[in-house]
Image (spheres, rainbow, N blue to C red):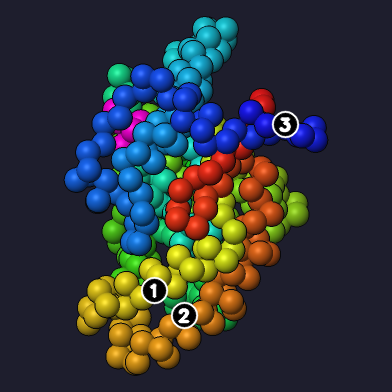
Amino acid sequence: MTENLPSPFMEVERDEWKTLRERERINITEEELLEIRGINENLSINEVDEIYAPISKLLRMYYENYEKLITRRADFFRKEHEKIPYIIGIAGSVAVGKSTTARILRALISGWPSKPNVYIVTTDGFLFNNSELERRKLMERKGFPESYDLRKMIRFLYDLKSGIRNLKAPLYSHLLYDIIEDQFLEINEPDIVIFEGLNVLQTNTGAIRAREPELMVSDFFDFSIFVDAEEIHIKKWFLERFKVLRETRFKNPESYFRGYYKIPEEEAMRIASDIWDRINGKNLRENIENTKYHAHLILKKEEDHSVSKVMIRKI
């Protein structure tokens, strides 16, 4: 572990990190990994074994201690033991691999000896729908903090941490580029919820009136992970993904982005680059990048998507 200047984080290089796995069980096959990994992500079983298995082991230690604390606290107050889900937040830029990280961790955590009930909830479902974004003139800032229904998101997390067993999370369609009205993810008696999104580590809600108590999304997290990479690499991944989607999903007549399939590739890629520079890159620089040190754990990825370094908060 390398430590230069004093820091609340330990930096662990890949070669040392991978030794921390020891006998942590990997319950993901090559076929399952094909379903888990995102578009254009060169993710191998070796990467799961060396990077994500130690994270799973670390999370199991945190979760087991969390369960003990819940039990001992209930005993202290002479109260009945409540089942309160453990919430893991995952943050990072568009195209950096947040969703893949969430799916890998769900698969690994589900394989723990206790077989916890694990759900993934994404913040996409808490975006204002397109008609509301248009009314607010925010379509060009979709994904920026102000484009989310923050009250609804915090209400959901509040209910989750209040021990409400059966909740519904709103769903989002990347095909339609909009909220799916009247469809929900039903969350029944969760043990662990992975809450994934761009701005989940944001430290100022901004949308709640000053006279109200201010709550942040991260207030409800028990553990948080930031997936990090240089912007030049993330933009490259974004453009590669756009190119693949243009030849696949965008061909669907129902796709919001069908127009990009119909125009010449060179023009479509020029537009995609402009979208990055005006929207996604701007959001990364202004709102996302500066939240990473609020995370408990930071994954530093290189150009080939491999993780070269892990930073873990000391306490």
Q: Which mark is residue 272?
A: 2
Q: Nearer the viewer, residue 303 or 27?
A: 303
Location of mark 1 (residue) = 242
Circles 1 and 2 in contact, beta carbons < 8 Å: yes
**Residue 51 on image: x %, y %:** 44, 36
Three-letter amino acid code at the position of disc 1 = Phe
Three-letter amino acid code at the position of disc 3 = Glu
Is residue 305 positioned above or below 45 on the image?
Answer: below
Q: Which residues are magenta?
A: 105-111
Location of mark 3 (residue) = 3
Q: Foreground mark, 3 or 2?
A: 3
| Element class at badge 3 | loop
| Element class at badge 2 | helix
Q: Quadrant of residue 286?
A: bottom right
Left or right of 259 on screen, residue 223: right
Labels 3 and 2: the sequence-earlier one = 3
Task: State the predominant SS element of the stretch in magenta.
Answer: helix
